[in-house]
Amino acid sequence: MPSVLRSPRFWLQFCLWFALVFGLGCRFYGLNWDESTGLHPDERFCSGIVPRLAWPSSVGEWFDSAKNPFNPSNLVNDKGERDTHYVYGQLPLIIAKAVMGKQTDPPEPTLIVRAVKVIQGKKQDENVEALPILRGLSAFFDCLTVLISLLIARRLLGPRWGLFAGALVSLAALNVQQSHYFTTDTFAATFMTLAFWNGARWLDTRKWFDVLGLGFWFGCSLACKLSSAFFAVAWLGFVLLAWRRYGAKRVLPLALCSFLLSFWTFRIFHPMMFMGTSGIFDLHPDTRFLSFMTNEAIGPGGQKIFTREWIGDFGQQLGITSGEVDVPFNVQWVGRKPWLFSLVNLGWWGFGWPLLLAGISGGVWALRRPKKVPVLVIATLFVVVSLGVQGAQFSKFTRYFLPLTPMFALLAAFFWRELLIFKPRMRPAVAAALAYSFSWCLAVTGIYGRPNTRLEASRWVIANIPAGSHTIAETSWDEGLPIWGFYPPNGSYKDQRLESYDLDTPKKRAQLEDALNNGEWLFITSGRSWQNIPRWPQKWPMMTEFYRALFNGELGFDKVQEFTSYPGIGPFRIPDYNLEEALNVYDHPRVMIFHKRSTFSPENVDRILSAAPLPTTDQFHPRDAPGQWDSLPQPQ
């Protein structure tokens, strides 16, 4: 055996590289996990916009928001009515359009699309499924995030720990999952990581192109998601640290150039934010995207009270995020504890507990030694502000923390490095932390190698339920069965919806009873309704009792089939349906099919639904929900 193969250092390097390459491969595994049926609503929305957009005929048209054919706000339906309300940045759409080319008749595919057709064995005049290509684009950008994270950690901590940090990012389950969706999050995270890399380089090299890179990539991230503004903490940290090291005379002009480059990069790649009627320098906001209005009211003492309300598509999104606007997907946050809920989801699912806890410990350690590791202090402050603000707001989507994966990996690698200096015997703990990340990454990736549960359930329905049968779905806000594109061989089903998210009223009670009396089969395709509606019994007392009676068998329906695809290795599965819904309801929801018993009684249903006192008001705001309930119904 060659002496190099007997070297522990060789095997350490081999394991780290293997873990990193394995994680990169996981991002491309099973990209067509839903057979291009578009089961992720945000992805379905974004991918549906791309073919409808067109490049402008001039530079002036690009910046004129009302005329730009690449502005989603200008898209209209057959009736000439505006039908698209886009709240993200345009840069991912620009990249996607450049990759896909013109998809409408006559199509003008790019070299990338032509290459995909060759790989798939298709003729050049045949259509190609767009979703796998767009998801591959997300996966590619997240691979860049991994490699840039490695470079950052290598510069700050050395080659070995740089590779360790890169492996941690590569194995992060949250990143693997988001790589399987065409949404704006992976793009924004990549650009923020690039900005951090340039900032760290600038402090060492003092090169002008690094500080300009810091500004340029920050502007790109803003042009993907406006919430990237939290990176301003890191940008300001790099500027202040450079000021302290090299003096104001050298740093301030460069910082000003970096700031201006950030803004104008954002202006160029997200032109729909501004009116632009008179050109690029017209910075009046487009009110369709974001504006505000001032409301006047009379206070208790007769004084005038003025309040400001954000309006426009993004203004509406701000209202949803704050819990002021009542939409179905906001119900899941009722009763969730600030910060704790986000940390639990990151620990159990997104990062894994070893990465999360080691990252937190590394941040605390860095704050205690700010002069030795100032860049890590900047990373820590970025984490604290992002987690502090977004973990405290009403909407607590775990994907919001995707840009923090490189920061946590960097801080975790620092923690383990410093710990081993004082306690070399802790090396097995480091290996165990990496093994945990590897195992959880493998468990989550396995989801994309199995049939999607909604598609599996659709095939079961077609094979076992005759066409013409009466079926019941929960709500228009969730997928029904069978999924679009799956049809019974002879006809269709007579479908009714409970519209579970509608306010409980006498009219809704009559509709529920009618659907249950007529229906033979009841489909629950995820936990979006049954896991969240009972969290607000003050608004949905009747629906809460409905789910309780359904699951305990009192309603008169029996569960005859269940489809699950939890993360796991081999025969071992880890149920994750009790975590944040977005972590499971798209790529591996828990699907249940109920069949009406022969002893079903309409009188019994009326008794159950009538027992719940209906709400006496229709004014409900998720932010004001008490978050109090006796118990949450659970399926048997």
Image (cartoon, rainbow, N blue to C red):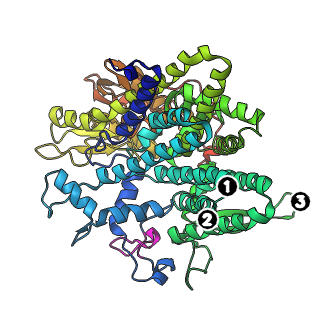
Dominant secondary structure, magenta: loop
Question: Counting residues from the N terminus, which is met first, the one under dot 2 or under dot 3?
Answer: 2
Which amino acid, by three-letter code, is at mark 1? Trp
Residue 413 seen in this snapshot = yes
User: Residue 619, can we see it?
Assistant: no
Instruction: Count how many numbered circles sit on residues in the image.
Output: 3
Where residue 2 appears, as percent x and y from the top left, is 34, 20
- Determine the residue located farthest toward the top in the rendered image: 425
In the rendered image, the quadrant that contains the C terminus is: top left
Task: Name the outermost residue toward the front.
Answer: 3
Query: Is residue 87 covered in magenta?
Result: no
Q: Which residue is mark 2?
A: 262
Query: Residue type at mark 2?
Result: Ser
Q: Which residues are magenta?
A: 69-82
For label 3, the residue is 301
Verify whether residue 74 appears in magenta. Answer: yes
Residue at 69% x, 45% y is 378
Q: Nearer the viewer, residue 136 or 614?
A: 136
Inspect the image, locate mark 3, and give the three-letter code of the amino acid beneath it. Gly
